[in-house]
Amino acid sequence: MRNLLLTALLILTSCGPKATSLEDFHTQPITLPGGQVIRAEIMISNFDLTRGLMFRTSLAPDHGMLFVHAEAGNYQHWMYQVLIPLDIIWLDSNRDIVEMAENAQPCKTQASKCAQYGGKQISAYVLEIGGGMARKYGLSVGQRVQW
């Protein structure tokens, strides 16, 4: 399984244009179905998959976070300690959008009371972008994302 994750990381980091600024150094270009390109931080380790976008006070409109799971499954997300609204997009192993939660709001209560989003469809990746950006980019279930 570790080799699979390392292979996925190598593939993700070797494709596409190189980072042009320090802010983009640890990101991967992701091409959306409409041709727009965003830069996504790649989360692979259990720690990173759990932390995600917690404690961030902003997210640039052309940036996001891509969660890479070791195997396809049902992955719920929540907004505990996330400070900004997000669009959460689940992708299958072919990188097709299989589920979306638009404009998920930060959870300002105790963890046990935070809403759970998604996880109804089998996915291998989850892309998080700023709240409202999925609509702006015209994203919908069935479309393919590329990297």
Image: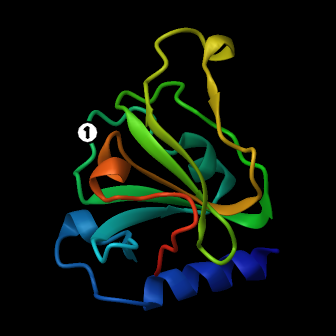
- Quick one: quadrant of the N terminus? bottom right
Q: Is residue 84 above or below residue 69?
A: above
Q: Quadrant of residue 69?
A: bottom right
Image coords of residue 107 (percent x, y)? 49, 19
Question: Residue 122's spot in the image, x, y percent?
Answer: 77, 58
Q: Quadrant of residue 36?
A: bottom left
Q: Residue visible at 38% across and 71% down?
A: 32
Q: Residue 121 location in percent, x, y? A: 74, 52
Query: Number of numbered discs present?
Result: 1
Other-residue count near label 1 (Cα within 10 Å), few / some / many at <14 / 14–19 / ≥20: few
Name the foreground residue: 89 vs 12.
Answer: 89
Q: At 39% across and 64% down in the image, what residue appears? A: 40
Q: Position of residue 103 (x, y in %)?
A: 41, 34
Above or below, 138 relative to 55: below
Q: Going 35% across and 58% down the picture, which residue do you hit? A: 138
Closest to the observer: 139 or 127? 139
